[in-house]
Amino acid sequence: MGHARLQPLVRLDSPHRRRSTVARPSGVLLGSLAFVVVGGVLLLISLPGAARSSRLRHHPVDERGRSQPGVGAATAEYEATKDAQHEARRQAIINRLTEPAPEPDIAQQQRLQLRTAALLLRTELLDIRHKIENFRKDPTVPDGFAFPAFEWEKHRELIAQDPVLYVVVEQAYTTAHRVNEILAWRRTVSTSRLIGINDADGLAGVDAAASAAVAALDDLVNQQMGDVPRKSHHA
């Protein structure tokens, strides 16, 4: 406030007001109140316009500074619409996350499991046929040789759900198992443990049974994938 001498607060209509004509006023603006020193006298002045401008500052104004309360209402409505849309999207996500999972189609699951087992068995049976083909080139039986049946051991119960298919595939593996037993017995009575394939060992029967089983498995897979009518296969 400089070096002005402070006086008690006085009203604007006080005689001291005349001093304002001879002294430069100075003061501090605090919200809607103003502390002004005029001629050494401290005045407290209320500014009604400041309160009014405070109420109006929430309304948008145009390029000339004029208040546009209608635009403010439209903006509020737009914001409310956005909030409602956001809440609707949020609720939709919650509903999707909390809704119960659909009941599994048991029949479809069984068909898929059966088809998977058929493909694995087909691969194993083709391997048996490949080994038989190699024996035609070299009849020597390697030490510890046996036709495989790993997939059959894992999936035979599942294949049993289709009785027609089971009969065909079971015949192929049973025939291959008999040849495994024959070769194991021949090795035990051989003095050198080095043996070769004979016509009496039954490899032709294994090859025929494996071929029929592969055809039956192919028929099952194709039928499930394209609804092709099943065929009859005989060992």
Image (cartoon, rainbow, N blue to C red):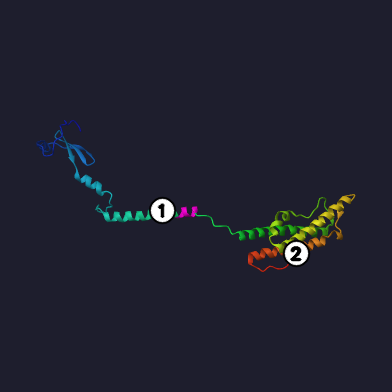
Q: Foreground residue, 216 or 136?
A: 216
The three-letter code of the residue at mark 2 reads: Ala
How many labels sit on residues?
2
- The answer to whether 17 appears left or right of 93 in the picture is left
Residue at 87% x, 50% y is 188
Q: Earlier in the sequence, mark 1 or mark 2?
A: 1
Vertically, is 211 above or below 91? below
- The answer to whether 233 appears left or right of 73 in the picture is right
Q: Secondary structure at mark 1?
A: helix
Confirm or deny contact between disc 1 and disc 2 (CB under 8 A): no
Q: Foreground residue, 87 or 128?
A: 87
Magenta span contains residue 7: no
Image spot of residue 197 (x, y percent): 85, 57
Residue at 27% x, 56% y is 70
- The answer to whether 172 appears left or right of 195 in the picture is left
Which mark identifies residue 87? 1
Magenta span contains residue 96: yes
Mark 1 neighbour density, 10 Å: few (under 14) some (14–19) many (20 or more): few
Where's the N terminus, which quadrant?
top left
Q: Main secondary structure of the magenta part?
A: helix
Image spot of residue 170 (x, y percent): 75, 60
Image spot of residue 171 (x, y percent): 77, 61
Vertically, is 94 above or below 163? above
Task: Choose top left, top right, bottom left or bottom right for residue 127.
Answer: bottom right
The residue that disc 2 covers is 212
What span is in magenta?
Answer: 92-98
Image spot of residue 3 (x, y percent): 18, 30
The three-letter code of the residue at mark 1 reads: Glu
Residue at 73% x, 62% y is 214
Residue at 22% x, 47% y is 52
Where's the C terminus, which quadrant?
bottom right
Q: Secondary structure at mark 2?
A: helix
